[in-house]
Amino acid sequence: MSYALLQTSLTPPSLEALERAFSSGRGLTPADARFVAGDAFGMLARDLSEEDALFLQGTLSGEGIQVEVVPETDIPRLPDARLFRLAQSTDEAFVIYDALDRPTSIPWASIRLIAAGYDQKEIKLELILGDCEGRLATSVDKLHFNRMPQYRDPRDPKNIGASFVYFVRDLEAHAPHALRNRAAAFLTADELTGDITEGITYPRPGAYLEEMLWLLWRARKG
């Protein structure tokens, strides 16, 4: 069985602390520290032996970095995504439409996680349903905002970026119980400040996915 090192919080560790923790070269080396430091979104390492994982847990703890040693089998697995391009919100449910405009209603209570962000490929939006029982996915360039007036700014209806922000905020308003990843939390803050693109950007697609898995793991763990 292989094991992962999962942080107890999403606080990114410093490069220097990781280099010292990995100095023995067991499981991870100081050369790995730069990659890990720039990409730490809850998961520091995966596919380790139990012995190496426990050893690194100790060296990381010595640097003030708290991690748990978790069997890979305990990490949630994301289901295949169901893509959508058109949606609307009602009081009772989130409704998506297929290519033939046939609706599927998703009760708000079933939305477990709202995830957004630029993963270096596209600006994405995903919803995880239940305990990883379903997954809905779309992106800014796929959404037909011209057919979704409730998410458009009447003062600037062609501003797709503003429509995307409204979309995420509407989901959060209807499903306040849902977990939010860092980018979704940024977009639903009371006031957006600074560079919005910077606030929702992940260093690579894997980091975006790892944060989702970390949030779901923590929620499942309780």
Image (tube, grey):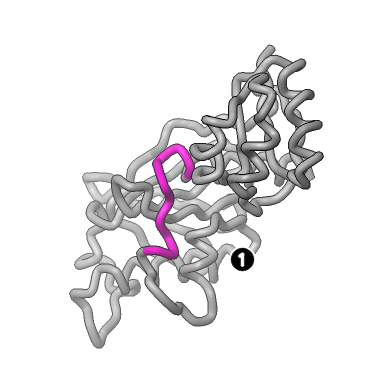
Q: Quadrant of the C terminus?
A: top right
Please give the name of the residue rendered at 49% of the width and 51% of the height, measured from the top-left corner: 106
Q: Is residue 124 above or below residue 147?
A: above
Residue 76 position, x and y percent, is 62, 32
* Type of the residue with mark 1: Pro
Within 10 Å of disc 1 (Cα), the crowding (few <14, some 14-19, many 20+) is some
Residue 168 position, x and y percent, is 44, 65
Residue 83 position, x and y percent, is 34, 42
- Counting every numbered tag in the picture gives 1
Q: Which residue is mark 1?
A: 176
Q: Is residue 30 above or below residue 182?
A: above
Furthest residue toward bottom: 155
Q: Is residue 20 above or below residue 105?
A: above
Left or right: 214, with 155 as reference point: right
Please give the name of the residue rendered at 71% of the width and 46% of the height, measured from the top-left corner: 219
The magenta-colored residue range is 198-207
Please give the name of the residue rendered at 62% of the width and 49% of the height, measured from the top-left corner: 14
Q: Is residue 23 above or below residue 188?
A: above
Please give the name of the residue rendered at 29% of the width and 45% of the height, measured from the top-left corner: 121
Residue 90 position, x and y percent, is 45, 67
Q: Nearer the viewer, residue 73 or 5?
A: 5
Left or right: 103, with 172 as reference point: left
Circle 1 — which element? loop
- Is 44 contained in the magenta span? no
- Is 199 contained in the magenta span? yes
Q: Quadrant of the N terminus?
A: top right
Q: Nearer the viewer, residue 50 or 160?
A: 50
